[in-house]
Image (cartoon, coloured by chain):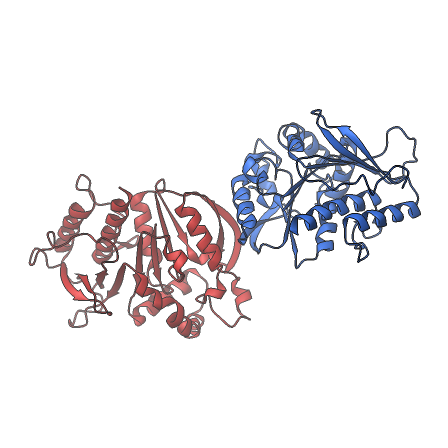
Chain colours: A blue, B red
């Protein structure tokens, strides 16, 4: 079981979709923790909190369902329809080989955290997350830009109090961002930094990522915010398509399955847009899922 | 936890409502197993079975939820709205001192049966149940009489195969019916026969129901269909209002709480219609709930 956690529009659905497609729907099921929202959008208007607050969600039922899935039992999962902002009828979810849970609060409680084999926190800079959120909520969820901006302001305190502290409980922290020290043109694809914490057995990348073997990916020994040693993987957005393809192939052969080509769904941001940093991130997560399953 | 089981329109909701009101909503919650229907009414039209078939219900989820409630955990219960024949959004149910589960199939599986402290099967004669069903489904569920008759015919085989066999697993079998050996006028209230099986500790009624103490209730030693000895309690519908009131008072003082009057909600069939056989049945069930809870 993998948790993909982060603030609203941090990229959870995008990273999850590629993993589910790569593993196949027969073996993998994904669950949105947003389905555990306790109130409809209209009901929330009178409430003193946003969906980022634990009290705005059936946290105890989410814990219960995670435990049931972790022990091989089916659940009748609630469903929150984002397109209309309403809770609708529940659906049966059978446990599968791989279960990916993405949402705002899956790592909020100790009991929920104990259910996961691997945990990921998505940590983009706020200005990037906000741009992503405005785009998504106006295009697919029927909000105006002003409404989204108001929601961002309204949820800031709860994000700081409940969502961001979960970063401390992640085995892997992923940050998509431009590289501050370079002066790349605005349409340069985002780079990514992955912090691989020693809270789980991380893949040994020292062999495959030897210095100067590629310009696209670098491995560095670094210190976490608490001083503990971690691997820091930098994946650059500015390198050429050829360099990117070679780096993805190299990582897939080392961490994925060298007998097959990497699934085409990896790295897809939209049907027409690819990201090598996203693909590399997904290859490392797939390695954890496949390795943990062996 | 009490199970109230029987075919469609056998009287489950009526007997349950009086118990819930007597115990109070702070201490008692009732759950309809119909909420675990797997399909909407419209979806069922193309299916080769009726709601009486286990495959037409989330039986494994019902088992899971019964186990969770029995061990003191909340559930997110599905909801089936009979007035529109559709599954709607689920609702949180917290465990309480007394949990009453009524439905078509709560005693179908061994795992579900193991969750209950007391189990009741409602077993009215078919012609009475059909009259009740036609009345209810045309008045509150939007069916025509022809549709109800067609449904009764369509569900007969599944009732025989799945619903009626649960009678064997009940601690108490309740049969509301006119007395065949008498020639009472048609508007005479129905009598009731209660079979009290020794599968649980039944109340000792030999003291309170000594011969000739009342015309309303009789206790007889009888043999069950499998030959085992049981108590058979006959409650007559034809006795006078004074005899009925005295019998109810006597039973309540023996089995309920002699410090208080019997709750007014016991015996209510509708806001304007009372039944002493129903009230006596509910007093015996309340005795089990209160006695088991002590």
Report x, y in % for residue B150.
Answer: 44, 74
Apparent side of residue A235 relative to residue A53 in the rendered image (left or right):
right
**Is A159 situated above or below B1?**
above
Report x, y in % for residue A178.
Answer: 85, 34
Residue lying at the far left in this picture: please name it: B212
Which residue occupies 42% across, 60% down? B140
Q: Nearer the viewer, residue A156 or B9?
A: A156
Apparent side of residue B30 relative to residue A50 in the rendered image (left or right):
left
Kindly indicate the quadrant of the structure image that contains residue A276: top right
Q: Is residue A18 something one can see in this rendering? A: yes
Q: Is residue A267 something one can see in this rendering? A: no
Residue lying at the far front in this picture: please name it: A207
Which residue occupies 26% across, 41% down? B294
Report x, y in % for residue B180.
Answer: 19, 72
Q: Nearer the viewer, residue A199 or A73?
A: A199
Apparent side of residue A184 relative to residue B106 in the rendered image (left or right):
right
Report x, y in % for residue A105.
Answer: 62, 37
Kindly indicate the quadrant of the structure image that contains residue B148: bottom left
Counting the numbered discs, the total is 0
Kindly indicate the quadrant of the structure image that contains residue B145: bottom left
Q: Nearer the viewer, residue B25 or A204?
A: A204
């Amino acid at each position: 079981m993998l948790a993909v956690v982060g603030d609203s529009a941090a990229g959870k659905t995008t990273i999850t979709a590629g993993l589910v497609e790569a593993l196949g729907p027969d073996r993998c099921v994904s669950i949105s923790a947003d389905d555990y929202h306790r109130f409809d959008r209209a009901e929330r208007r009178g409430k003193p909190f946003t969906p980022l607050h634990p009290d705005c969600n059936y946290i105890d039922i989410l814990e219960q369902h995670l435990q049931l899935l972790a022990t091989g039992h089916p659940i009748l999962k609630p469903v929150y329809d984002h397109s209309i902002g309403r809770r609708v009828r529940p659906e049966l979810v059978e446990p599968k080989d791989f279960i990916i849970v993405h949402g705002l609060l899956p790592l909020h409680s100790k009991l929920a955290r104990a259910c996961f084999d691997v945990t990921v926190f998505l940590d983009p800079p706020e200005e990037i997350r906000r741009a992503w959120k405005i785009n998504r909520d106006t295009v697919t969820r029927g909000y105006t830009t002003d409404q989204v901006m108001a929601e961002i302001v309204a949820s800031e305190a709860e994000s700081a109090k409940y969502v961001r502290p979960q970063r401390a409980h992640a085995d892997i922290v992923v940050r998509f961002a431009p590289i501050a020290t370079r002066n790349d043109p605005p349409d340069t694809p985002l780079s990514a930094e992955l912090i691989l914490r020693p809270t789980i057995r991380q893949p040994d990348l020292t062999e495959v990522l030897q210095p100067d073997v590629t310009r696209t990916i670098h491995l560095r020994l670094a210190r976490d915010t608490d001083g503990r040693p971690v691997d820091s993987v930098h994946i650059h957005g500015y390198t050429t398509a050829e360099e990117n393809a070679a780096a993805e192939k190299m990582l897939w052969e080392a961490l994925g399955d060298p007998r097959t080509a990497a699934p085409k769904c990896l790295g897809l941001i939209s049907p027409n847009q690819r990201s090598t940093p996203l693909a590399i991130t997904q290859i490392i997560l797939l390695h954890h899922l496949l390795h943990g399953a062996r």
